Image: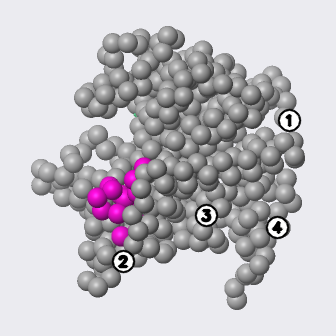
Amino acid sequence: MTIVTADLKEAFKKAPIKGMMDNVMEQFNSAADQINLHPNIRKILSITNNEIIVNFPVKMDNGDVEIFTGYRVQHNNALGPYKGGLRYHPTVDIDAARALAMWMTWKTSLAGLPYGGGKGGIKLDPTRYSKGELERITRRFTFALADNIGPEHDIPAPDVNTNSQTMAWIADTYMSTRPPAERTANQHVVTGKPDGIGGLEGRDRATGYGVYLSIKFWAEKNNKSLEGTKFIVQGFGNVGYWAAHFLEKDGAKLVAVQDAFGSVQNQEGINVEDLFKYSQINDGSFGGFPNAKPVDKNKFFTLDCDICIPAALGNQITIENAPQIKASLIAEGANGPTNVEGEKVLLERGITIIPDILCNSGGVVGSYFEWLQNRNGELWQLDEVMVKLHKKMKESFDKVYDYSKKEDVDMRTAAFCIAIERIEKAYIQRGIFP
Ligand code: NAD
């Protein structure tokens, strides 16, 4: 275990702020050292296969044309087609897309899926655009990506500020650009679609359910009960809401929540469904929610609780707040919410982290089920989906937990080692062309 001395803390503070790419590379290199990864494979996995940047014009409601920049980074496809979400956010850039694409490669490998890793999105603030504008932006982005995506090549999914509606527009645009006889056979170009057009029953809750299951499995391994356990959630979107929903059903108590609009707390408990309904009728915001008090957003992660679920953006738990965190468990719903320096402090303090590539992998497992359903012309029922998801999450959790105990490493290192070893094996077996 790394000991963080006062000097080291000072050094971290003075160091330039690192991007997500530095973060994922440090995590990768540390796991690669641990497993003695073959140097040639380390070289391959350290870079991305393809990086697509598209600038495209879209007509706005007032008749003006605005130019947007979209990204799709394809990190690795040794195990299968590239897979990963599309994010609409002002922080989207090539560095973020590369890092998120790499995390996807490790996540799909760890989950034992026949996929590689990709990620992308558009740099924009979606609150500035009408629904009609967002539809035209999405359709034009899909057209600009053209054959760089495809159901057997690169399969996007929802991420921050994109949802089943966004996926429906992408699927429709992509299918419309195929020759007529091939159109319906291309429905699985994206996952996370609405259930009326090939979407999977339960895909909406898959990621949050996986976060909840990861917490439950951890509690079971440690002989703890979730009844009365206090948790806080950053991000009350798809992942944060569903994780909170399932935890509350199991007796745990939501005591604080933060989103892009603000932060509220109530140590007596916040009813998840009431908060959700309130935010639905208030444009997604819970500002003014009557049963909780506003809190300073900078103090959010340091509030009293047992479990902390970052389920919004990357780089949220850092050297600045990690020393004051009260939770004994961090369950990473978001991708890359804890940076390397923050993680060192948490581990030194004996706080467990269920890493993103395990904790939020229920989403990509659900996406895999949807892809199979479309590919095979099947329709799966919700209860069947939930049972299969539970089985997959349990297998992954046990693999990581057992590896971490056996090798005496933290759960992130264990998850990375398992994921990278599977890709290393694929390269060793198939060799390098030509
Ligand atoms: P979402 O758009 O549904 O919700 C995002 C939430 O984060 C919203 O409540 C928003 O208000 C909040 N937020 C945004 N900026 C914030 C800020 N600066 N501070 C606090 N809160 C902020 O997105 P989502 O699909 O729930 O994704 C959340 C995270 O989970 C992302 O990191 C995403 O990559 C990851 N993830 C999502 C899925 C999925 O299936 N949706 C799967 C795996 C991982």
Which residue was labeled with disc 2? 185
Q: Amino acid at mark 2?
A: Ala
Which residue was labeled with disc 3? 113
Indicate whether residue 262 is drawn in magenta: no
Q: Amino acid at mark 3?
A: Leu
Q: In the rendered view, would you say 239 is above or below 119?
A: above
Q: Nearer the viewer, mark 2 or mark 1?
A: 2
- Specify the farthest residue to the bottom: 434
Which residue was labeled with disc 4? 39
Which residue was labeled with disc 1? 1
* Mark 1, secondary structure of its residue: loop
Q: Nearer the viewer, mark 3 or mark 4?
A: 3
Q: Amino acid at mark 4?
A: Pro
* Earlier sequence position, callout 2 versus callout 1: 1
* Earlier sequence position, callout 3 versus callout 1: 1
- Distance between mark 2 and mark 1 Cα atoms: 51 Å
In the image, what residue occupies the spot 48% across and 68% down?
372
Task: Give the quarter of the image for residue 141.
Answer: bottom left
* Earlier sequence position, callout 3 versus callout 4: 4
